[in-house]
Image (cartoon, helix red, strand yellow):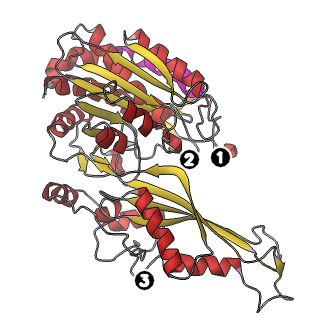
Amino acid sequence: MIGHERMQDVDDYIDGHFARWVNELVPLCRIASVSAANVGLAECAALFAAETRRLGMRTEIIPLAGEGSPPLVHALLEVPGARRTILIYGHLDVQPAEPLDAWHSPPFEPEIRNGRLYGRGTSDNKGQLFAHLKAIEALQRTGRGVPANIRIVIDPQEEIGSPLLSRFAAANKAKLAADYCYIADAAAAAGDRPVLYFGNRGSCYVEVAVRTADRDVHSGGFGGPMPNAAWRLIDFLRSLRREDGSIAIEGFYDDIVPPSPAERAAIAALPHDPAAWRRALGVAAEDGPADMPYFEKIMLRPTLTICSLLSGNTERKVKTVIPACASAKLDMRLVSNQRPEDILDKLRAHARRHGFADVAIEPYDFQYYPSKTPIDHPMGAVIAGAVREAFGVEPLLYPVSGGSNPGHVLRNVLGIPTVMVPYATHDEGSHGPNENLSLDFLRKGIKTSAAVFVGLGAL
């Protein structure tokens, strides 16, 4: 790994130009590039493309499904004599900002307070993606140069499951080829401890619904013989889960790949304070199998979550009705070797087998495959060294993140080993009100990216 003293010129350049870079980031965060509403994507893609062109990158904006469709930004910096190509993945889209009245400042008018930049997209993912661009600038302007080819792919639809990315990647494998993929996204661990994520869980998101009558009816005049859609749905949901918290869908755990010895060792080394965790969240006890360790539940076991329930009278007033319809949204997080389409089939088969053929089950486009890079891959040591150098602490190694992202496209479709490091603090608040990016973390993230490019270029 490149020693810190040999990168002092780069660090000094970053420190000297950081205030200017924050000002350059602000216009990107002013754009309400909300993929769920299909707004602001082209404007934001144009701004990111301009940033990459300023670095001498050959840049194109590619509509993912024909003219007028969401625009992906692809940029390539070709370095004469470089032996390695590093792919940088990030996304330009953001979550909707509602509820607006919960923000302390308007979500698309970025504001600096107490050393943080507040606004939608500051952390997830515009600010963290921006860090890579400034690392390239620092290496170029100091005369050190970038020792690897850098390919950047900026996704316009990550927040809605990247529905068009997999097909694009499969059709453009040669165009997107790289030796390594590096991502800056998500949040640091508790205590703002830096993390290396080597994988991600997948996701199968569905809506289940049942209708028992043509209309809601009086709960007194019809109560007794009248079927109740809410109870019918509850009975179905109850059939999906055992008393110990495990999932009762037949075959749900089939084909799961057990963790490697290196992954088990990494998990065993992760700090966790159960009492502090309970206090922070206001819960009485952990859910799930009692004999299963916390991080194994989050990283290595699939889950089934009821995300919402809707039926009957939802207003804060008395309305005595028997509901005719009821629905719920379910999020199933998947681990290695599970496939969303297979889990969907098993859920539907479970419904038929247990007498719930009347329950309609419809998937959303938000479907992700799980994926992993071996935790002992050589790129991990290079990135860990860069993080240690920039942040001044030993990073944690997570075999898998609890969340889901397009890692499958990078690792499995393109075949590129991939590691993700958050450049945001634990309390960055992405997806919620008052999302923010610590400027201190951003500065350290830029230094990390510069060291990663140098280290991976020499690997």
Q: Main secondary structure of the magenta part?
A: helix
**How many numbered discs?**
3
From what the image shows, is residue 258 above or below residue 186? below
- The dot on residue 243 is 3
Which residue in the protein does label 1 denote?
102
Residue contact between numbered discs 2 and 3, judged by CB atoms under 8 Å: no
| Horizontal side of residue 264 vs 77, given as left or right | left
| Horizontal side of residue 57 vs 181, given as left or right | right
Secondary structure under the numbered disc 2 in the rendered image? loop
In this rendering, the label closer to the viewer, 3 or 1: 3
Binning the other alpha carbons within 10 Å of mark 2 as few (below 14), some (14 to 19) or many (20 upward) gives some
Coordinates of residue 350 in the picture (x, y in percent): 48, 75
Q: Residue at x 42, y 81 (%)?
A: 242
From what the image shows, is residue 214 above or below residue 162? below
**Amino acid type of disc 2?**
Gly
In this rendering, the label closer to the viewer, 2 or 3: 3
Secondary structure under the numbered disc 1 in the rendered image? helix
**Amino acid type of disc 1?**
Ala
In this rendering, the label closer to the viewer, 2 or 1: 2
Span highlighted in magenta in the image: 13-32
- Which image quadrant is residue 274 in? bottom left
Residue contact between numbered discs 2 and 1, judged by CB atoms under 8 Å: yes
**Residue in front for this viewpoint, 176 or 130:** 176
Q: Residue at x 28, y 76 (%)?
A: 291
| Horizontal side of residue 77 vs 47, given as left or right | left
Q: Is residue 20 visible?
A: no
